[in-house]
Each structure stands twice: as structure tokens, then as C-alpha cells.
Image: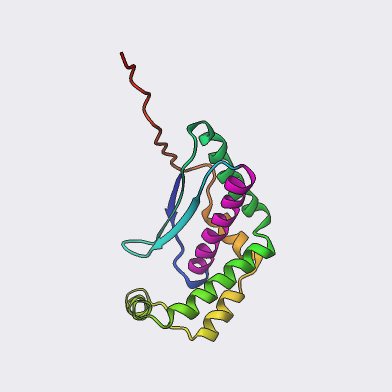
Amino acid sequence: MVWKGDFKWNDKDRQGFSMLSHILTIKCRESMREDQGGVYSVSVDGNTSKFPKPKYMIQSTWGCNPENITKLSRTVLDEMRKIKKEGPTVIDLNKVKETLIRQRETKLKENGFWSSALQNHFLLDDKLLTLEEYKTFINSFSIKDIRAVANKYLNTENYVEVTLTPSAKPDSK
């Protein structure tokens, strides 16, 4: 399932959008794999681009028994609707915050992080934040903030759904 649209390019929306993608992955994994046993893994990847004009894309992918496709597609939409209506749970939001901060602490020691950070600073006007500034920024996000981002970018009525299913077995004679 794929969603695309125009994006408001600012730090708060970009980070909130990233956090929303992580939260959706958690919720879909819990619902689709743990509660329904319908998939081995599921991902909800969200990305943004600034050029040629600010856009976003969300892609949800999973593998399942073809009989479960409709039910699991509905589950993704249901999880999106819940976040739009109620926002994420405190537990899920805190999980994402902790994960992002831990990842940043680890990545600060890698050349690849710095190469990317400097490139984004000069090309996209990203701010270079100290670890403490980053922690403060991440921890500033509330349930209300994520809910607002969800309502801005999760369109449960307009998306593309693509299904790959096995072909029928040929008759063996």
C-alpha cells in the first residue's frame, strides 16, 4: 500500500513524520503479526523529499497468505485511523523516542552519519544538533503533535494497493 502527497518542509513535520512511521510499524506489527498471526514481518516506511518540490511517501509492505490480504489491508487502514483519532499511546511514543535517541548516540561515532549530516546541512538546511539538543527536540514531541502529523499526512481514502499473488498451478497431465 502506498500513499503520496505534498509535504510541508519544516523540522517539526519531518521529525514527526519519521516518528509516525515508526509508530505505525509498531502498531501494524502488533496487530498483524502478534494479534492476528497473519504475517511474519511488516514495515511502514515513510520518507520525504524536498526537491523538486516537497513530497512525502508512505509504503506499507508485508507478506501473507493470499486469503488474508483484504483483512490485513483493512488492519493497516484501521491503525492509521486510530492514530488520527487518538494519537499514539504514551508507551509507543516513548519507545520511538528512546530508539531514536539510542540510534543517534551510536551513529554519532560513525563517519557515514557525519557525511550525511553535513550533506543535509548544506543541501537541505538541516540544523547540526548536539546530542543534548537532539534529545530535547525528540522529547518535545507529544501525543498531540504526532496526531496532528497523522491527520495532515495519513489519507486513508486515497492510496494505491498492489497485490502480488502466486499464479494458479498448471494442470499436470
Q: Residue at horizontal 43%, vertical 51%?
A: 4
Q: Position of residue 58 (x, y in %)?
A: 45, 53
**Quadrant housing residue 72:** top right
- Depicted 47 relative to depicted 2: above or below: below
Front residue (pair 53, 59): 59
Q: Position of residue 92 (x, y in %)?
A: 64, 62
Q: Residue at horizontal 66%, vertical 52%?
A: 85
Q: Residue at horizontal 34%, vertical 81%?
A: 111
* 153 sits left or right of 36 in the view: left
- Depicted 100 relative to depicted 164: above or below: below
Q: Position of residue 26 (x, y in %)?
A: 58, 56
* 2 sits left or right of 52 in the view: right
Front residue (pair 51, 75): 75
Q: Quadrant of the C terminus?
A: top left
Q: How is the image coloured?
A: rainbow
Residue stretch rendered in magenta on the structure: 13-36
Q: Residue at horizontal 47%, vertical 70%?
A: 10
Q: How many marks?
A: 0
Q: Is residue 126 magenta?
A: no
Q: Is residue 17 magenta?
A: yes
Q: Position of residue 123 (x, y in %)?
A: 32, 75
In the image, farthest residue toward the top: 173
Q: Give the overall secondary structure of the magenta segment.
A: helix
